[in-house]
Image (cartoon, helix red, strand yellow):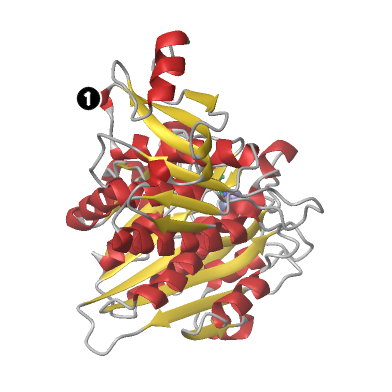
Amino acid sequence: MEIKIISNPAEQECDILVVNLFEGEKTTQELANKYAIEEDKFEGKFGETYLLPTYGKQKARKILVVGFGKKDEFCPDKLRKATGKAIKKANQMEAKTVAFDYSGVDFCFAEQFTYGVGIADYSFDKYKTKKDKHVETVYVNANEDAVRRAEKITKAMKVSRDLANEPAQYATPSKLAEIAQGLGLDTKIYDKEECERMGMGAYLAVAKGSAEPPKFIHMKYSTPNPRKKIAIIGKGICFDSGGLDIKPASSMLTMKDDMSGAACVIGTMTAIKEFAPDVEVHGIIAACENMPGCSAYKPGDILTAKNGKTIEVDNTDAEGRLTLADALCYADELGVDEIIDLATLTGACMVALGNQAAGIVGNDDNLVKSVIETAKACGERYWELPMYEEYKESLKSSVADMQNTGSRWGGASTAGLFLKEFVEKTKWAHIDIAGVAYFDKAQGEFIKGSTGAGVRAMINYILK
Ligand code: BES
Ligand code: MN
Ligand code: ZN
């Protein structure tokens, strides 16, 4: 799909002309005012739409009125969601050309508009013999640079969403490694033996139960005089069966998405290469599967992570933190200024925040605040969770330095405290995207499936 910038979208020949309506106000279109508002009492409540044919009276074949709700409650997030809704509707109607003529909106217009279009236009139909229909051209009057910038970001989201939607049978650790290697960055893939030599006993234990070999991926974007060095780490469990502590069938159903953090890192790296910022960026993924094969790691096993700390396995389903432990140690040794990890880490975070926000913790207040702010500005919601010392009590082991799970209560916080043990000298933030990475059903501008969580926030944070 292509976004074309034109000065007068209302005069454009098209299948659908989209206009907005704030409650109690009028639209820019006489026809819509007469039929939608006066005759049919369409009020313009947020999220509602009204479709009206023009019967050749106008250049647009149809007018779609999108409710923007109360003007004083309108915000950039609503602009994005309403735009997404219009695109979804246009796709359903098999429209090819859609012009947007919004009035009375200026803030972040081009950015959120483009995110809305790009997110809603996404579909995952590569395995369907009958392909989904898409709008071909969108016409809008908006700042061209801002549109093109946001387009690059939704393109990166698509890379990430495609990867996380891909079934685990294809999106294996080896496949992720192959994709990472093809990005044109400076990329190193470490195999099992090399990881053994590096002392990654926690990560390798998780990989043991699978026939798929683990791949530790390190992508690097460099620039001559970097103003800053950042490492982003993505949880890369290509399938999480739970291991010997096997999950119930219903919980396993979406576990191909347990590499959403990794998918975010790969998507982000593709855009970083295009934006070419004066920041050095490392993308790190400890990819493997968590399976209950005959050589699987077992409850009670004691593992030694890369930094020498020992971990008693209390539950093989708390595997993400084990793989992240070694990835964090590895990143901590790179001498970067900041480390950010993204992980579908805990069901507890999902219980706490639902699918409206990701949880965030870290060892540096400024970093955490800054990431939250950046995320908010581009339409992602991160909510800080506490990491009180007292939570650590439940991670105590009688035979090792710690165990891999704590109390059921406050599970997202104990997971954060566990990870903290593996970052000794770098500023670090951890984002738990368990609730936001994958939607069970269509929601707002998103279809069912992967959402590309973290991509917008990471790219914007790196470019900031
Ligand atoms: N991948 C899961 C977390 C998850 C759950 C992500 C639901 C997305 C949706 C993770 O590896 C896991 O199994 N966590 C356990 C930890 C527990 C054993 C301490 C959980 O949250 O139940
Ligand atoms: Mn698990
Ligand atoms: Zn997992």
Say what secondary structure mark 1 lies in: helix
- For image coordinates 45% across by 9% down, the residue present is 39
Quadrant for ligand 1 reads top right
Residue 90 at x, y percent in the picture = 57, 39
- Furthest toward the right, the residue is 129
Residue 441 visible to an observer of this rendering: yes
| Quarter where residue 15 is shown | top right
- Give percent across and percent down for residue 27: 34, 26
Q: What residue occupies the far front of the structure in this picture?
A: 57
Of residues 86 and 459, the one nearer the viewer is 86
Residue at image x 32%, y 61%? 144
- 101 or 260, which lies in front? 101
Q: Give 384 or 393, whichever is nearer the viewer.
A: 384
Q: Position of residue 59 (x, y in %)?
A: 49, 40
Q: Which residue is mark 1?
A: 72
The reply, left or right, for residue 204 in relation to residue 81 is right
What amino acid is found at the position of numbered circle 1 in the picture? Answer: Asp
Quadrant of the frame with the N terminus: bottom right
Q: Where's residue 133, x and y in %?
A: 67, 48
Residue drawn at x 35%, y 25% as measured from the top left: 21
- For residue 111, side relative to residue 97 (left or right): left
Q: Is residue 312 visible?
A: no
Could you classify mark 1 by the number of other residues whose Cα lies within 10 Å: few (under 14), some (14-19), or many (20 or more)? few
**Quadrant of the drawing holding the C terminus:** bottom left
Vertically, is 225 above or below 411?
below
